[in-house]
Image (cartoon, helix red, strand yellow):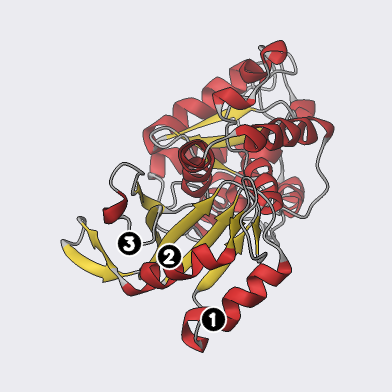
Amino acid sequence: MQFKERTLTQIAHMICGNGDEQTSHFVYRSSMYLTEFFRDCGTDYVHTGQTRHIWVADRLREILAMSVPGAHTVPPAFSAVIAVLMDQEDARNETSDRVKSLGALNDALKREGFEAFYAEDGRCYLRHHATRTVSVLEANPHRPMSKEEMEQRGHLEAYLDRASEDELIEGVLLPLFRQLGFQRISPAGHVDKALEYGKDVWMKYRLPTMNWIYFGIQAKRGKLDSSGVTKGSNANVAEILNQARMMLGHTVFDPEINRKVLVDHAFIVAGGEITKAARNWLGEQLDASQRSQIMFLERKDILDLYIVNRVALPAAAVPKRDFGLSDKIPF
């Protein structure tokens, strides 16, 4: 990812805090404090006397070069730079909501297609204008969650309890995979089943090497088990076997390159639990090459990934009594 020189220079001046001390909205940082700033961002850059704003712009350029092409997000290190720069405790000549400094930052970012905003956790994040994708600081689904995140997780879990298979796909999985950087996400739909070939969704992902890999998704709304009889909303893994084989054996047409391609990997997604017995049985029925192509995603994985990647909850997932909650979630 590349930002224009003008943008990098503007942000570099903000980090350096260049300007009149009586009117500037950013902390002035000398050489030692620039090194400290980048250490707080998780990098090991050390300023050794160069012209400050030029040195900072060069470091920002290096950080942006770490991004994955086409992901519509900036690298985590750049997200950290923005978060540290816009720390509400560093407000100068304005209130702690930092409206003026946020405006100055967005004036620079808008030419790159991004905008900065404060989330309810008080930290500043970047959002891509066109795709609404939020660049996250640390998308670790195993990290501890805040009280607000646990509340949102509960809302989403309740939604999954009542969501149909189409609602699971359209309302939950598609926004999640878009946020994760997958592209050309194309749901097969459930009107003409003959056209699915075992896939509810196909999508592609660009590797740092610029190669594309293709994915298919087979989604079931309930628990996926290996019992002899399908019960209630539970899906039997035997129903998935033929669909998984079809998914891996049939091609999809990619209009961006105007040719058919094979699906490289298949996601088996369940809105409930995928039992260990179900995973093992499915693995035993597939040959070695096919087993390596199958990946599983169950409810707890969906919930954790959804929250830590700051994906907007489906409208129907927010209880009516918490009507104002959606206004508090600016992503």
Q: Earlier in the sequence, mark 3 or mark 1?
A: 3
Q: CA distance from mark 3 to mark 1?
A: 19 Å
Say which residue appears at 44% left-offset and 52% top-offset.
Answer: 71
Residue 244, percent from left and from top: 45, 68
Residue 208 occupies quadrant: bottom left
Say which residue appears at 57% left-offset and 32% top-offset.
Answer: 312
Residue 314 occupies quadrant: top right
Residue 15 shows which numbered tag?
A: none
Residue 17, percent from left and from top: 64, 33
Identify the residue position indicated by label 1 in the image.
285
Q: Secondary structure at mark 1?
A: helix
Three-letter amino acid code at the position of disc 2: Gln
Residue 182, percent from left and from top: 44, 54
Q: CA distance from mark 3 to mark 2?
A: 7 Å
> Residue 291 or 125: which is nearer the viewer?
291
Residue 67, percent from left and from top: 49, 57
> Is residue 17 visible to the viewer in this orientation of the structure?
no
- Left or right: where 181 falls relative to 102: left
Identify the residue position indicated by label 2 in the image.
243
